[in-house]
């Protein structure tokens, strides 16, 4: 009698152990499938195939039976996008995939999978990505991380520079590696994002679409990643704005309509105010709204320049507070104490050297003398021949005791008759460190206006330089050292 009772108990516990073991290692996405915007555009049949193949790649199966829902070409496109959407499956070798097609239906019934590394290495990569993304709350966190930890790969020739696994190992990538890494980190952070590729800058290129607050927007993180900061001009573009320079491959994607979200990119609540010094990259002014304005207001309140709450609206009170901050902190420049939160203003505001309303003033500002500047400049290349122009030059810090921590560059263009064909634009580099006596090559990209095609001369000048002790040098005289600033543009150089 005792034996008859024990046998089913043993069987029950044996089955329980098997069930627990199966549950401990689920072959499933580590994030909701809906984080992939591409996945949500698939019909139910293709979603099922996507899920089946993902699970098979996760567990390292040699092949898998699939429902008859795709032709060979459709299946190839689906797996190609799965490879770019889910680069955490770093063991997958898409070039070795083989398809078995039903003679009667013409649809794929079996897929033989190939691998380039072990599943155990893939599991380790899963854990690493999950650890990195666990503190990310937004797309802004991902952009900030990628731009701080990766650079464009000009040296490598192997395909590894195109993939997230190798890119994160090396800390450098080309556009495909950038896009894969961004999409993967977004998914692990439960941020809606998908990979897009097509043509841009005269060749193949990759970028991303992001879903945030019920809206879709487009971003090119490769072009946004600058050596000295983030060019937010390529983050948060509408469909029309991105399509002016980027053409997606039409047979691969159903891309939802996208809107411009620049100026509203949400920053992580976990970031300290000093971390934001590296994250702000666009000018704020009257009429702007959103989280970046709210962050600005909180810092102004903290320093005593603004009373009341942070409502996220850049109104008259915020403008007056910014103007007072500029006066107290010696930030005049070409805009004067206008109440416009320029990039240099924000760099000073979020720095540890920001002077409170009742604090001691900064070292008095001095204008740049025309005959002797606190730095030396050697021109390099100027290119506006592609969709993404750049200016590159070398600068030496001639200040004997203080490092350069920020500078603002102004650029514009004249036609052959001397008329202005491209209005002046300012670009601020912040968070840099050029030590006394040190030389540094500076490069920044910009989006050329069509009017630049009529330009004969592209001109630029450094109009503001900030040193580590808070001293700011200003040049209002844009012809003060014209032998350095007037250059004909080079039509033969291809921008990246």
Image: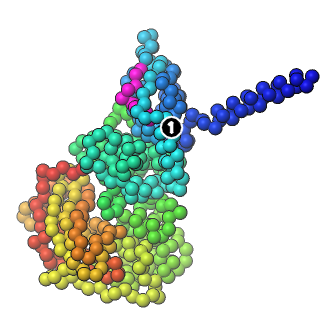
Residue 488 against residue 41 in the figure, above or below: below
Q: Residue furthest front?
A: 3
Rendered residue at 35%/69% (across/down): 431
Rendered residue at 15%/65% (across/down): 379
**Image x and y of residue 50, in percent:** 49, 31
**Image x and y of residue 137, in percent:** 52, 56
Between 99 and 356, the one nearer to me in the picture = 99
Q: Is 305 situated left or right of 173 in this image?
A: right
**Image x and y of residue 35, in percent:** 51, 43
Residue 9 visible in the displayed image: yes
Q: Quadrant of residue 17?
A: top right
Q: Which residues are magenta?
A: 91-99
Q: Is residue 103 inside the magenta stretch?
A: no
Residue ID for mark 1: 120
Crowding around mark 1 (Cα neighbors within 10 Å: few <14, some 14 to 19, many 20+) is few
Between 321 and 136, the one nearer to me in the picture = 136
Rendered residue at 11%/64% (across/down): 487
Helix, strand or loop at disc 1? helix
Q: Residue furthest right?
A: 1
Q: Is residue 94 inside the magenta stretch?
A: yes
Residue 313 against residue 129 in the figure, above or below: below
Q: Quadrant of the N terminus?
A: top right
């Amino acid at each position: 009698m005792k034996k008859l009772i024990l046998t089913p108990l043993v069987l029950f516990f044996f089955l329980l152990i098997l069930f627990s073991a199966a549950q401990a290692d689920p072959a499933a996405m580590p994030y909701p499938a809906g984080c992939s915007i591409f996945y949500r555009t698939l019909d139910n049949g293709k979603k099922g195939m996507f899920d089946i193949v993902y699970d098979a790649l996760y567990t390292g199966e040699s092949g898998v039976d699939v429902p008859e829902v795709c032709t060979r070409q459709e299946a190839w496109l689906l797996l190609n996008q799965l490879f770019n959407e889910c680069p955490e499956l770093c063991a997958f070798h898409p070039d070795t995939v083989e398809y078995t097609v039903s003679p009667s239906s013409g649809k794929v019934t079996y897929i033989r999978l190939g691998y380039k590394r072990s599943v155990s290495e893939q599991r380790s990569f899963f854990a690493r990505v999950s650890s990195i993304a666990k503190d990310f709350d937004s797309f802004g966190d991902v952009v900030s991380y990628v731009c701080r930890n990766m650079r464009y790969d000009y040296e490598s020739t192997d395909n590894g520079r195109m993939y997230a696994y190798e890119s994160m190992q090396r800390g450098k990538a080309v556009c495909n590696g950038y896009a894969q890494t961004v999409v993967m980190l977004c998914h692990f952070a439960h941020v809606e994002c998908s990979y897009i590729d097509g043509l841009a800058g005269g060749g193949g290129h990759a970028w991303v679409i992001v879903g945030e607050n019920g809206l879709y927007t487009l971003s090119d993180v490769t072009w946004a990643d600058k050596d000295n900061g983030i060019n937010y001009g390529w983050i948060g573009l509408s469909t029309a704005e991105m399509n002016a320079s980027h053409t997606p491959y039409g047979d691969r994607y159903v891309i939802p309509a996208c809107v411009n979200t620049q100026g509203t990119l949400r920053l992580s609540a976990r970031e300290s105010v000093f971390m934001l010094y590296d994250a702000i990259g666009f000018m704020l002014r009257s009429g702007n709204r959103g989280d970046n304005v709210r962050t600005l207001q909180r810092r102004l309140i903290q320093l005593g320049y603004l009373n009341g709450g942070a409502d996220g609206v850049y109104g008259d009170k915020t403008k007056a507070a910014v103007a007072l901050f500029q006066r107290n902190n010696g930030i005049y420049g070409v805009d004067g104490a206008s109440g416009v939160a320029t990039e240099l203003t924000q760099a000073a505001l979020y720095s540890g050297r920001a002077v409170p309303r009742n604090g001691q003033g900064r070292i008095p500002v001095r204008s740049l003398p025309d005959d002797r500047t606190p730095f030396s400049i050697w021109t390099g290349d100027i290119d506006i021949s592609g969709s993404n122009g750049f200016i590159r030059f070398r600068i030496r810090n001639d200040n004997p005791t203080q490092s350069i921590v920020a500078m603002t560059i102004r650029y514009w263009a004249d036609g052959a008759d001397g008329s202005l064909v491209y209005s002046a634009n300012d670009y601020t580099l912040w968070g840099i460190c050029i030590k006394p006596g040190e030389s540094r090559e500076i490069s920044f990209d910009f989006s050329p206006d069509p009017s630049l095609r009529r330009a004969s001369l592209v001109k630029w000048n450094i109009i503001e330089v900030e040193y580590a002790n808070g001293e700011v040098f200003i040049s209002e005289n844009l012809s003060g050292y014209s032998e350095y600033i007037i250059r004909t543009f080079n039509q033969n150089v291809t921008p990246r």
